[in-house]
Image (tube, helix red, strand yellow):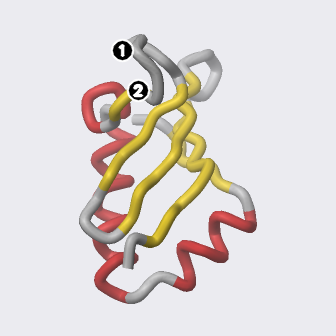
Amino acid sequence: MYKLDYSKAVEAVWDSLPDEARAELERALVVICQAPWTHTEPRGDDHYDVERTSALKHTALALLVIDEPPIRRVYLLNIDYLG
């Protein structure tokens, strides 16, 4: 399991999402934190690019996967509401 991190700015966007979008995002992040390489797409051509994306029904996410010890992390860089 990866630890989820995000900035105050990302938290503000998350909190401002409509209920349906926020619920979808929360479900997706649980799955992403369990296996980020499986449940996200690379931003570039390299399948193991640490900069990742995920497109949901209501939002698009930009993420950074950090696999270095001691704590593996998924850093949520940006949430775009597709509204």
Q: Amino acid at mark 1?
A: His
- Mark 1 element type: loop
Q: Are there few (<14), some (14-19), or many (20+) residues within 10 Å of tag 1? A: few
x, y percent for residue 55: 32, 52
Is residue 67 left or right of 46 when viewed as pictured?
A: right
Instruction: Give the mark nearest the N terminus, 1 or 2.
Output: 2
Quadrant location of residue 39? top left
Q: Amino acid at mark 2?
A: Pro
Quadrant of the snapshot with the C terminus? bottom left
x, y percent for residue 22: 39, 76
x, y percent for residue 69: 62, 17
x, y percent for residue 16: 55, 85
Is residue 4 left or right of 29 when viewed as pictured?
A: right
Residue closer to the observer: 61 or 36: 61
User: Residue at (60%, 28%) from the top-left corner?
Assistant: 71
User: Residue at (34%, 53%) from the top-left corner?
Assistant: 30
Q: Is residue 50 above or below residue 80?
A: above
State the mark number for residue 42.
2
Residue closer to the observer: 59 or 68: 59
Q: Is residue 3 above or below residue 68?
A: below
**For the residues bearing labels 1 and 2, Cβ distance under 8 angstroms:** yes
Q: CA distance from mark 1 to mark 2?
A: 6 Å
Q: Is residue 44 above or below residue 74?
A: above
Q: Which residue is mark 1?
A: 47
Q: Residue furthest right?
A: 8
Q: Is residue 50 above or below residue 16?
A: above
User: Residue at (64%, 21%) from the top-left corner?
Assistant: 70
Marks counted in the figure total: 2
Is residue 53 left or right of 9 when viewed as pictured?
A: left
State the mark number for residue 34.
none
